[in-house]
Image (tube, rainbow, N blue to C red):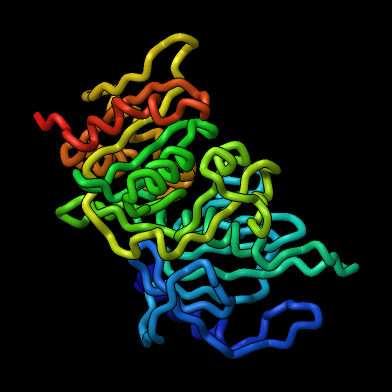
Amino acid sequence: MVNQRQDCQLRESTFLKVDHERRGSNPKSDLRYYYSTYGLKIESQLKLPELPVIAPCAKPDVRIVTASVDEKLEDATFRKGWLEMGDDRCQITIEGIARYRVEYGQRILLERRVPKVVDSTTDPGDIRLFLLGSALGGLLHQRHWLPLHVSALNTPSGVWAFTGHSGAGKSTISAWLHYTQGWPLVTDDVAVIKPHENVPYLHPGPPRVKLWKDALAALGIRTEGLVRDLTREDKYHLMLNNAFLNAAFPLQALVKLEHAKEGEPASIVRVKGVEAFKILMGSIYRPEMAEKFNNDLSLIDNVSALLCQIRIYRFRRPWALDDYARGIEPLLSEIKDPVVE
């Protein structure tokens, strides 16, 4: 019986022989571009300026192919809005932008949506935004890895990562610590743990920072020339390649960020057991994909193993940016002089 990897390779050779591209007036190109992210070597038919460039390689881990993609994922067992999933495959449809089919943790087929009337406001960066986000996230889950929705820095006591609900301030706190303490950034959106590795290395994703307008103002960064987030008008993308470490380092701690109540002082506490487990599970990127591409037992085993290797904290602080430095003092103290039990 042909296994999934062999099946993917056989079908890939067929795809590459046929011109499936839809680019409007853009001519087909046989050029290939090579990048690295999440510890993967990528061969792409699409330029990805957000990623570090590497030398061409004969056996990339992932191939990104511009191709025709069927409107529906055949044999899908999960369909909800923009996402369809089946065995080791998923399809993401972003109307007016692109359709992405992610297969076997090895390949992404991308069909650009070309409207009948040319929309001069369409930005190629929109296509890459979802490619480097949800599409690559699905591919990581298909490899049975643990992509975490975190920001992280390499501090004097190792890599510390921050998680929390949308708006909790993950990007703001990392950017603040980077600019005030000089600590290198590791990731600002998604990074991955590979459970088969004996040490919990945090492999970084694309080197970009997403900050709200008020956080940019507090850091003295102007919004002119920055890319505005597609879904949030007051959030902007910064490409800070030189500020990021393009290498994996062991994860030491994961901190859940929470807003303190009015008048409540900032505090940081170490958490363990069920509470720590919930925090780590809550930090998984695209959890619906994690549930689909992993069985429950393997996902729980991987999360439990990681819990034994890192420390989990809960950090509550005032939300006001005008006194941000004082609000993060307990966190800074713990990072610089952690209590290791």
Q: Residue at x 36, y 82 (%)?
A: 59
Quadrant of the snapshot with the C terminus: top left
Q: Residue at x 79, y 69 (%)?
A: 114
Among the 4 quarters of the image, the one containing residue 238: bottom right
Q: Residue at x 54, y 72 (%)?
A: 49
In this view, the residue farthest toward the top is: 263
Among the 4 quarters of the image, the one containing residue 35: bottom left
Residue 168 appears at what percent x and percent y?
49, 31
Tell whether 244 sits left or right of 73.
left
Q: Nearer the viewer, residue 299 or 306?
A: 306
Q: Is residue 336 visible?
A: yes
Tell whether 273 sits left or right of 12.
left
Tell whether 217 sits left or right of 289.
right
Residue 189 appears at what percent x and percent y?
46, 49
Residue 338 appears at what percent x and percent y?
17, 33
Quadrant of the snapshot with the N terminus: bottom left
Q: Residue at x 84, y 66 (%)?
A: 120
Above/below status of 82 relative to 26: above
Q: Is residue 149 visible?
A: no
Residue 274 appears at what percent x and percent y?
27, 23
Number of marks present in the image shown:
0
In this view, the residue farthest toward the left is: 341
Q: Nearer the viewer, residue 166 or 223?
A: 223
Among the 4 quarters of the image, the one containing residue 231: top right
